[in-house]
Image (spheres, rainbow, N blue to C red):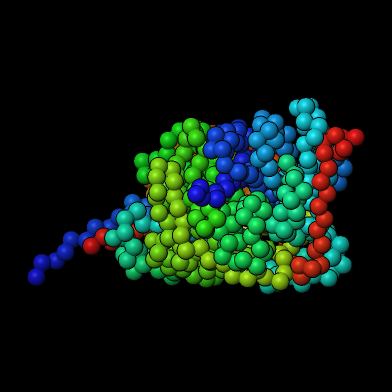
């Protein structure tokens, strides 16, 4: 039996994302460029892994919605913006830059 | 038989959008020869609150500051081609906005321009009287100490349809929901009933995709080398083609930059969305969970399987309150040992707030160039940073204070670092801004009666 060589790449190489806010909540879409990467993302980019990206900012929960017809995912992270657009001390009160924090996760290509 | 098709163009996605964007959209609508409308979404939660503060200062202010610049180049050709222009550009003061449109129309030689004023969204009295329940998402917010600025309900498309039925050329509204601005001309043209949920869902999706302007045509999308777009300095704004049989195609203004493809559509479809089967608007609950997208030509994407559910009995209300003060100050360091100097600067700035005994609610420091927008208030990322030595770092101090003076004194601490700071510290800038806090409430829709008044520019300008 031969071992399959696995390649680790940034999520940014195989998918794109946009972030938006509503109050202190953040949503991030995630779409693979190629259909063959949909299942791989579904398996590897779990809600827990995404939540871990934001626990340093006090995030309390993360829900992933799967949209196979659209070949997309939607992540919703709760209590993450340290006050949101009106209350935050962060330069990016809307949290719009966080799509690229998501895309900095790594994935293993089989 | 020709298909019954209607076009909706968008001319602005927020207050501050590109003022040269509407004209190419209007030209494309005119060239199509099809019945059309344009809408402008210029109101955010914060924008409304700021507009109320402006109105207090000057009774003729408090509407979209770029209104005349947005409308100037398009008012005459839109009127001539019977393309109504709808916007929530009235903000906190729709009557003043209507007067400004009337004045502009008189200058352009359009005394017969019909201007509709849509009012009723201001529910400040109900919130002030404690009559409206707080939205569950904001149940934990204690606004006891804060002074109410204003409260506005997100009203739906029905009063806007009423305005179009009275042959309005320009519709001036305040806090309408964003999708309502697209639903209204479609409902008016196709004669949709306000309980035809799948039809209204088509309108809500149209509004949702178009309401942020260029965000569906390449704006906030392009990522050089990964997602390139043509001519990003001239991104064309979007146009939706809707047919009577439920077809929806998103495209954009002719002879412009940007693009419309499956990627731009998906990013905007999910933008600011939580549960994809439950996107609540005042007119319909939109379900995109089964949606499919299809590229049907260059810069043309069709959407299928959009579904609607009955609208809620309540409308969302945003109440804004005078909050505390934000003080910000920045300095720079660069070159050898920049990281150590930047860390020391950040620590000293935070320590200075204690040394001075300033009344600060909370404070944070950022190391711009190391970690900032992705960091936490306690600087978890820059404190633990162990990557390569950055060449150029900007240190930012941000504080929240109860008084302007404390915020000002705190932010000015960066200035003192020009003499007292680490070697080679430069480029101090600081500023203080008032903060506005918002809280969401719910109101039964029958408690928010709306009123539509249509008059000509000549009558208003009197």
Of residues B445 and B142, the one drawn nearer to the viewer in this rendering: B445
Above or below, A60 relative to B254:
below
Residue B413: quadrant of the picture:
top right
Q: Residue furthest right?
A: B462
Above or below, B128 relative to B88:
below
Residue B128: quadrant of the picture:
bottom right
Residue B340 x, y percent position in the rendering: 48, 45
Residue B288 x, y percent position in the rendering: 50, 64
Q: Is residue B376 visible?
A: no
Residue B156 x, y percent position in the rendering: 70, 59
Task: Tell whether B344 sits left or right of B192.
Answer: left
Q: Residue at the location (46% across, 60% down)? A: B304
Q: Residue at the location (31% across, 55% down)? A: A34
Q: Residue at the location (70% across, 46% down)? A: B87
Task: Tell whether A102 sits left or right of B238.
Answer: left
Of residues A86 and B360, the one drawn nearer to the viewer in this rendering: A86
Of residues B61 and B455, the one drawn nearer to the viewer in this rendering: B455
Q: Residue furthest left?
A: A1
């Amino acid at each position: 039996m031969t071992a399959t060589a696995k390649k680790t790449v940034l999520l940014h190489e195989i998918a794109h994302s946009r972030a938006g806010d509503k109050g202190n909540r953040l949503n991030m879409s995630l779409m693979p460029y190629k259909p063959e990467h949909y299942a791989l993302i579904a398996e590897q980019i779990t809600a827990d892994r995404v939540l871990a990206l934001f626990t340093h900012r006090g995030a309390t929960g993360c829900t992933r919605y799967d949209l196979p017809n659209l070949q997309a995912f939607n992540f919703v992270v709760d209590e993450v913006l340290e006050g949101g657009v009106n209350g935050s001390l962060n330069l990016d009160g809307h949290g719009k830059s966080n799509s690229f924090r998501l895309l900095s996760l790594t994935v293993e290509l089989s | 038989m020709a298909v019954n098709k209607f076009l909706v163009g968008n001319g602005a996605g927020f207050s501050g959008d590109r003022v040269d964007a509407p004209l190419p959209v209007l030209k494309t609508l005119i060239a199509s020869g099809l019945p059309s409308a344009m809408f402008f979404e210029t109101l955010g939660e914060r924008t409304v609150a700021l507009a109320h503060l402006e109105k207090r200062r000057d009774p003729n202010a408090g509407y979209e500051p770029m209104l005349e610049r947005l409308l100037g180049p398009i008012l005459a050709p839109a009127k001539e081609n019977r393309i109504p222009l709808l916007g929530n550009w009235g903000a906190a003061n729709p009557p003043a906005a209507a007067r400004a449109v009337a004045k502009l129309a008189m200058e352009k030689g359009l005394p017969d321009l019909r201007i509709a004023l849509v009012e009723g969204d201001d529910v400040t009295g109900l919130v002030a009287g404690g009559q409206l329940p707080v939205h569950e998402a904001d149940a934990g917010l204690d606004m006891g100490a804060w002074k109410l600025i204003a409260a506005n309900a997100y009203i739906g498309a029905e009063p806007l349809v009423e305005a179009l039925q009275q042959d309005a050329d320009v519709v001036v509204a305040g806090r309408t929901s964003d999708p309502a601005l697209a639903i209204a001309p479609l409902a008016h043209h196709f004669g949709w009933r306000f309980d035809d949920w799948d039809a209204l869902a088509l309108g809500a999706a149209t509004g949702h995709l178009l309401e942020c302007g260029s965000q569906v045509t390449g704006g906030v999308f392009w990522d050089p080398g990964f997602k390139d777009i043509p001519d990003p300095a001239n991104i064309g704004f979007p146009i939706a083609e809707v047919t009577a049989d439920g077809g929806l195609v998103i495209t954009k203004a002719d002879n412009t930059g940007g693009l419309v493809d499956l990627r731009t559509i998906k990013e905007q479809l999910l933008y600011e969305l939580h549960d994809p089967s439950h996107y609540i608007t005042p007119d319909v609950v939109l379900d995109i969970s089964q949606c499919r997208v299809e590229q049907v030509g260059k810069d043309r994407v069709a959407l299928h399987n959009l579904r609607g559910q009955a609208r809620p009995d309540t409308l969302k209300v945003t109440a804004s309150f005078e909050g505390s003060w934000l003080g910000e100050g920045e300095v720079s360091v660069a070159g050898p040992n920049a990281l150590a100097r930047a860390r020391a600067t950040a620590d000293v700035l935070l320590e200075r707030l204690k040394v001075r005994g300033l009344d600060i609610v909370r404070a944070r420091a950022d190391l711009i160039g190391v970690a900032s927008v992705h960091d936490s208030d306690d600087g978890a990322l820059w404190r633990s940073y162990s990557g390569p030595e950055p060449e150029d770092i900007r240190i930012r101090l941000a504080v929240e204070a109860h008084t302007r003076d404390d915020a000002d004194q705190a932010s000015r601490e960066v200035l003192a670092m020009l003499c007292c700071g680490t070697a080679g510290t430069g480029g101090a800038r600081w500023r203080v801004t008032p903060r506005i806090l918002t809280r969401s409430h719910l109101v039964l829709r029958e408690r928010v009666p709306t009123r539509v008044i249509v008059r000509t520019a000549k009558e208003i300008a009197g």
